[in-house]
């Protein structure tokens, strides 16, 4: 999956210089060798332990200096024009600190977590019990999917693709490393909205 992701970044790179950072969480499947052998342009940081999503992303973010930071999951593939479109959006809208795009699933359909409202305790309970994921769940139970929004402003986007303005990210702080995996993206979006 990481090979496909890196190939898509190489093939559909934005029309301006950019740098890719990969932090490997102590994999033993040849990932480090694949990245260093096939993608010499990538800045690779192999770790001797699985540091989790937040810490690993923070390592990469601290190494970069670009105007925009993209946190991108290794199981994603960037489609033609996506990066240029998203960077243009950020430049046209200086009020946006973090942006996400539609996340299409390989088997078709859209990942519901690409756009979310901040969940209440009831909304979180509904999501994790499955009631909030039902097709006709009312808005107060389907906050995790922001069913009332087709496109535009939402409370939170998915950590699978989070494009952030570095200057704003430095103000709110990086991913909270107390979240090893899951909900760190919601937390960061919450902090963005609070500033």
Image (spheres, grey):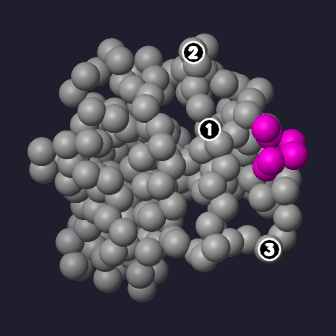
- Magenta highlight range: 35-40
Q: Residue furthest left?
A: 195
Q: Position of residue 114 (x, y in %)?
A: 46, 51
Instruction: Check disc 3 and report its element: helix, strand or loop.
Output: loop
Give the labeled residue for mark 1.
20
Tell me the number on the disc at residue 60. none
Q: Nearer the viewer, residue 174 or 183?
A: 174
Ranked by sequence position, the earlier of labels 3 and 2 is 2
- Within-10-Å neighbours for mark 1: few <14, some 14–19, many 20+: some
Picture residue at 27% right of the left edge, 33% below the top: 167
Q: Quadrant of residue 146?
A: bottom left
**In which quadrant is the C terminus drawn?**
top left
Picture residue at 21% right of the left edge, 48% below the top: 172
Picture residue at 20% right of the left edge, 72% below the top: 120
Give the labeled residue for mark 3.
28
Q: Is residue 102 magenta?
A: no
* Labelled pair 3, 2 in contact (Cβ < 8 Å): no
Q: CA distance from mark 3 to mark 2?
A: 34 Å
Instruction: Check disc 2 and report its element: helix, strand or loop.
Output: loop
Q: Nearer the viewer, residue 169 or 138?
A: 169
Give the labeled residue for mark 2.
16
Q: Position of residue 182 (x, y in %)?
A: 44, 71
State whether residue 68 is above or below residue 123. above
State whether residue 121 is above or below residue 33. below
Instruction: Check disc 1 and report its element: helix, strand or loop.
Output: loop
């Amino acid at each position: 999956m990481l090979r496909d992701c890196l190939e898509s970044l190489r093939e559909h790179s934005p029309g301006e210089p950019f740098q890719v950072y990969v932090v490997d969480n102590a994999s033993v499947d040849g990932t480090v060798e694949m990245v260093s052998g096939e993608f010499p342009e990538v800045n690779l940081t192999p770790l001797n332990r699985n540091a989790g999503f937040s810490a690993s992303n923070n390592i990469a973010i601290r190494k970069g200096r670009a105007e925009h930071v993209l946190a991108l999951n290794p199981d994603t593939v960037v489609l033609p024009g996506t990066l240029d479109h998203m960077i243009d959006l950020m430049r046209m809208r200086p009020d946006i600190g973090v942006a996400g795009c539609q996340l299409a699933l390989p088997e078709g359909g859209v990942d519901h977590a690409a756009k979310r409202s901040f969940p209440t305790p009831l909304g979180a309970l509904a999501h994790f019990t499955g009631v909030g994921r039902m097709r006709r769940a009312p808005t107060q139970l389907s906050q995790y999917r922001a069913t009332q929004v087709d496109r535009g402003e939402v409370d939170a986007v998915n950590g699978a693709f989070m494009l952030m303005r570095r200057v704003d990210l430095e103000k709110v702080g990086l991913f909270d490393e107390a979240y090893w995996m899951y909900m760190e993206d919601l937390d960061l979006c919450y902090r963005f909205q609070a500033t």
